[in-house]
Image (cartoon, rainbow, N blue to C red):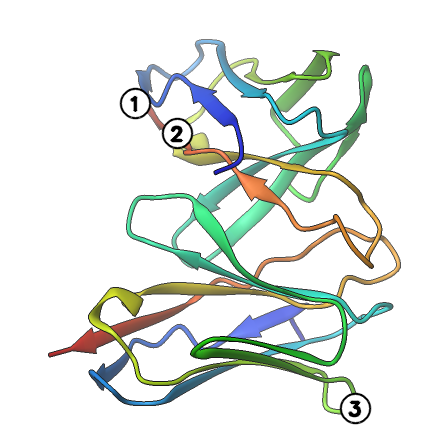
Amino acid sequence: RKEVEQDPGPFNVPEGATVAFNCTYSNSASQSFFWYRQDCRKEPKLLMSVYSSGNEDGRFTAQLNRASQYISLLIRDSKLSDSATYLCVPPPGSSYKLIFGSGTRLLVRP
Amino acid sequence: DAGITQSPRHKVTETGTPVTLRCHQTENHRYMYWYRQDPGHGLRLIHYSYGVKDTDKGEVSDGYSVSRSKTEDFLLTLESATSSQTSVYFCAISESLLAGGGNEQFFGPGTRLTVL
C-alpha cells in the first residue's frame, strides 16, 4: 500500500455544490495534517493546517479519522475559483517527513 | 506570501551538463527542502536541510547534490543532467520539523527544467 493515496479525479461539480475529497494514509505518529491547493503551473499553497482532529475555515472543513486512517476536505458552496488540484499531507510518521499526496483535481463549472 | 524565490525559473539544458538551481528565502526558517514534481508521482523529496551545512537525503536523491552555506540559500546541483531529470523543481521552507506547529511547508514558485 502506498503511504498516501488520493483519487486523482477530476471531480466536476456545478457552482454551489458541496464536494468532499478523501486521502488515505499509513504510518502515522502524529495528529497534525495539511491540505494544499495547487493551481495549474503554480506552486502548492497551504490551504489548511490542522493540529487536532479537525478544523473549519469558512467554506472549508478538514477532518482526521485516525481509526480508518484517512483525512478529508469538504468544500461547501463551491466557487469557480475553487477549481484547482488539492494535495493532502497526512499526519507524518516517525521520520517526521511530510508525504504529499498526488492530488485531486477539482473543476467547478458555471 | 512567504519570501521564497527560485532561480532560474526556466532552464533548458543538454544531457551531461551540470545544472545548479538556487533557492533563496528571507524568512530565516531553519528547514529547507527540494522537491521534484512529475505527473503521476506528485511531490517527491530530493534533499532537505536542517541548518547551515546540515543536509540529508530524501527519497529520490540519486543524481542530485545540495549545499547550504547560508541560512537563506539552498542550492540543488545536477552534476550531469539526464533526460529523466526533466521536471518541475520546488523549494520549500518550514520553521520546524516536528508535528504540533510550524512544520507546515511553504513553497517557492518552482523551476521548470528540461534536459534534452
Tell me the quarter of the picture where residue B65 sits: top right
Tell me the quarter of the picture where residue A32 sits: bottom right
- Per the image, label 2 sits on a secondary structure element best described as helix
Q: Chain of mark 2?
A: B
Expressed as whole percent of the image width and height from the top left, the position of residue A90 reads: 67, 68
Apparent side of residue A78 relative to residue B37 in the rendered image (left or right): left
Which residue carries the number 3 mark?
A: A67
Q: Quadrant of the C terminus of chain B?
A: top left
Expressed as whole percent of the image width and height from the top left, the position of residue B9 reads: 35, 23
Q: Chain of mark 3?
A: A
- Per the image, label 3 sits on a secondary structure element best described as loop
Residue in the picture at 70% in, 14% down: B67
Cα separation between marks 1 and 3: 47 Å
- Per the image, label 1 sits on a secondary structure element best described as loop
Cα separation between marks 2 and 3: 42 Å
Check if mark 2 and mark 3 are on a common chain: no
Disc sitting over residue B88 in the figure: none
Q: Chain of mark 1?
A: B
The answer to whether marks 2 and 3 mark residues whose Cβ atoms lie closer than 8 Å is no
* Upstream in sequence: badge 1 or badge 2: 2
Which residue carries the number 1 mark?
A: B116
Residue in the picture at 47% in, 23% down: B5
Expressed as whole percent of the image width and height from the top left, the position of residue A89 reads: 62, 63
Residue in the picture at 38% in, 53% down: B39
Check if mark 1 and mark 3 are on a common chain: no
Cα separation between marks 1 and 2: 6 Å
Badge 3 density bin: few <14, some 14–19, many ≥20, Cα 10 Å? few
Which residue carries the number 2 mark?
A: B83
Out of B85 and B8, give the one closest to the viewer: B8
